[in-house]
Amino acid sequence: MLNEATISVGRSVVARATSEPALVRGFLIGAALVFLGLFLFVPLAVVFAQAFQKGIAAYVDSFREPAALAAIRLTLFTAAVAVPFNLVFGVAAAWVIGKFDFIGKSFLMTLIDLPFSVSPVVSGLIYVLVFGMQGWLGPWLAAHDIKIIFAVPGIILTTMFVTFPFVARELIPLMQAQGSEEEEAAVTLGAGGWQTFFRVTLPNVKWGLLYGVILCNARAMGEFGAVSVVSGHIRGLTNTLPLHVEILYNEYQYVAAFAAASLLALLALVTLAVKSLIQWRAARDAVIRHTGGGESDA
Amino acid sequence: MSIEARNITKTFGDFKALDGVTLEVPTGELVALLGPSGSGKTTLLRVIAGLEFPESGEIFFHGENATDRSARERRIGFVFQHYALFRHMTVFENVAFGLRVRPRQLRPDERTIRKKVGNLLKLVQVDFLADHLPSQLSGGQRQRIALARALAVEPQILLLDEPFGALDARVRQELRRWLRRLHDEIHVTSVFVTHDQEEALEVADRVVVMNEGRIEQFGTPDQVYNHPATPFVYHFLGNVNLFHSRVHAGRVHIGEIEIEAPEHLGTHDAPALAYVRPHDIELDRVRDGAMIEAVVRDVRAVGSLVRLELDRVDGDEIIEAELTRERYIELDLRAGEHVFVKPRNLRVFLKEA
C-alpha cells in the first residue's frame, strides 16, 4: 500500500511538471482541430456532397455505366492478384530477415524500402522502359504478341511494385523482436519447417500480418501515379477506379466523377475502421499478456 | 542414453566459444555445466542439442554418431532459459505440441494426448493451470510447463539452459530441489547450464567447470570443490585466499612462514600462488610456531559462521577467515586487535612464466 501511494504521488508531480496552462492547451488543441477540419473533413464531405448533388438516382446511375463497372472490376482484380502475391513475398522476406543472419541483409531491407522512396511516376516509367515498345524487352514481347504496357499485366505489375513493402515492413520489426526461441523449441519438439511456420511463427504475427494486408490492399486499389503511366487509359479496358475518376472529372461529369471518388473514400474509411479494430485487438492481447505476467513467483 | 562430445570447436566471428571440448556424460546422470558468462557452456549445450553446429568435432549419443543429425532428429528435450513457451497456446496445448506434430501414423489419438498431458502437468504440479496462457503464469510456473513440454516427447536426453536463472532466490531454491527429486524419479540423462556454483554443487551428480571455451575440470561436487584442478576452479568455486609465495624443494614460503608442499619437491626457487579456503585459516591470539601476524579489520557474524577480514602486518594483502561461532566466542576478537594466522590445506600452483 505504501508503495502504491508513493507511486501515485510521484505520478501527479510528473504530470504537473510537464503540463501547460489551460489556455495554451486549449489553443493548441483548437488549432489542430481547425487544421484537421479544413484539410480532411471538408474535402471528404465535399466528395460525398458532390456525388449526391443530383440525388441518389443520378448517383446510382453513374455506376450503371459499362466503363464504370469495368473500372471497378479491374481495380478489384488488380488488388486480388497483387495483395496475395505481396502477402507471400512479405511473409517470406520478413521471415528471412527477422529470423536469420546472412550477408546482404541490410541491402535487402533497403531494397524492400525502395518502392516507398521512389516517386510513383518513376515506378511506372521503369516498367515502360523495360516492357514498352522502345524498352529492353519490347521487341521480343511484340514478336511473341505479349502485351504488358497499356494492358492489364502492366497495371498489375506496377501495383505490385508500389505495394511491395507494406506487409514486409509491418512484419520485420515484429519478427525481430520475437526472436527465434519459440521456433527452436518447436524444432526440438520434433516439428518440421512447415509445422513450425504454421503453428508457431504465423500465429504470433497474425495481427501485424492482417494490418499489413489491409494497408497493402488500400494502396493497391487507390494507386494512381504509377498505374497512370502504364495504363494507356483505354476506357473499359485499362482504366482502374482512380484513373476513371480523373477522366470523368476532365470531361466535366462531376456527379459521376465524385460518385466514383466516393467509392474510394469509402474504401479508405473502411480501411481505417478495420485498422483501428486490429490495433485494438492486438493491444488487448498484449494487455492480457502483461497483466497476466505481473503475478508473483510461486 | 550417454552423451559424448569429442574435440568440439565453435567460433562466432572472432570469438572462440568452444576450443576443443571433450566430454562424456554417463547414462542417467545429472550433470552441470558451470562457468562464468562467455565460458562456452550454453554453446556446448546448444551444440549437443543440434541448435548450433560445430566447425569441428563430433557428438555421440549412446555411442552413435549424431553430429549430422538435425535438432529435430536428435530427440532431445530442451528447456530454454526464458522458457520459450508458445505464447498463443494454452498450457495444455504447449505441452501437447510435441505429440501433435508427430507424423500421422505415430501420432497418439486425442484421448491418449489428453491423458498424457494431464499426467505430465500433474508431475510438474501445475495441472490446475491447463487452460491458462503462458502470459498469465509466474516465472516458476512457466519453468515447470517448459519442463513438462520437453518431457512430453519422452526424450532420452534432457538439456536445460540456465533453468533457474530468471527466478527469484526463494523459488530458485525450491525448484532446484524439485528438479533433483524429479531426476531421481525419471532418471533421464540430463545436462543443465548454470553460472551459480551453489546450484551446480547442490543439484548435480557431476560438475563440468568451464572457462574460455575449455573444460577446466570434470568431477563430482566434492572433487571440484575440495580438490580443484586449476587456479581458475579454486577462484570460481567458493571464496579463496591467495598468498604470493616462493616454492623451493618441496617447501612453500609465505612471508616468514614455511609449509610443506610435497607435490613440488623438484621445484627450485620458483614464484607460486598458494590457495587456501577461508575455513582453512586457523586463528590464535598467541603465536604458536610459524604464523603470520595480522590485524582484524572487520567482523561479520551472520548465521552459523563468523567471517573475519584480516590485514596482514607484513604486507598489504587481505586474508579472509571463517570461524565457527564457538571458536569466535572463545577467541573474542574485535576489530583492531592483533591475531596470528596459520593456513591449513593449502594448494600451491606455480606462477606461469
Image (spheres, rainbow, N blue to C red):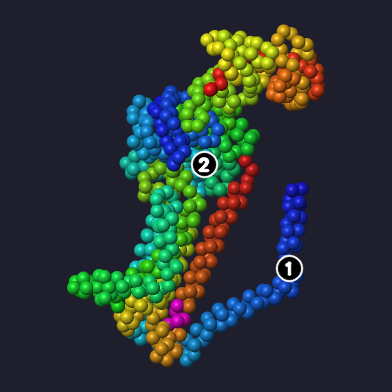
| Corner quadrant of residue A263 | bottom left
- Kindly identify which residue carries mark 2: B83
Residue B6: x, y in percent?
39, 27
Is residue A132 visible in the rendered image? The answer is yes
Extent of the magenta region: A260-264
Q: Secondary structure at mark 1?
A: loop
Q: With B150 as the anchor, is A68 left or right in this view?
A: left
Numbered mark located on residue A140 in the image: none
Residue at 57% in and 37% down: B165
Give me the chain letter of mark 1: A
What kind of residue is marked 2? Tyr
Calculate the distance from the C-alpha at mark 1 to the C-alpha at mark 2.
46 Å
Q: Secondary structure at mark 2?
A: loop
Residue B125: x, y in percent?
55, 36
Q: With A85 as the anchor, is B253 left or right in this view?
A: right
Is residue B155 visible in the rendered image? The answer is no
Q: Quadrant of the C terminus of chain A?
A: top right
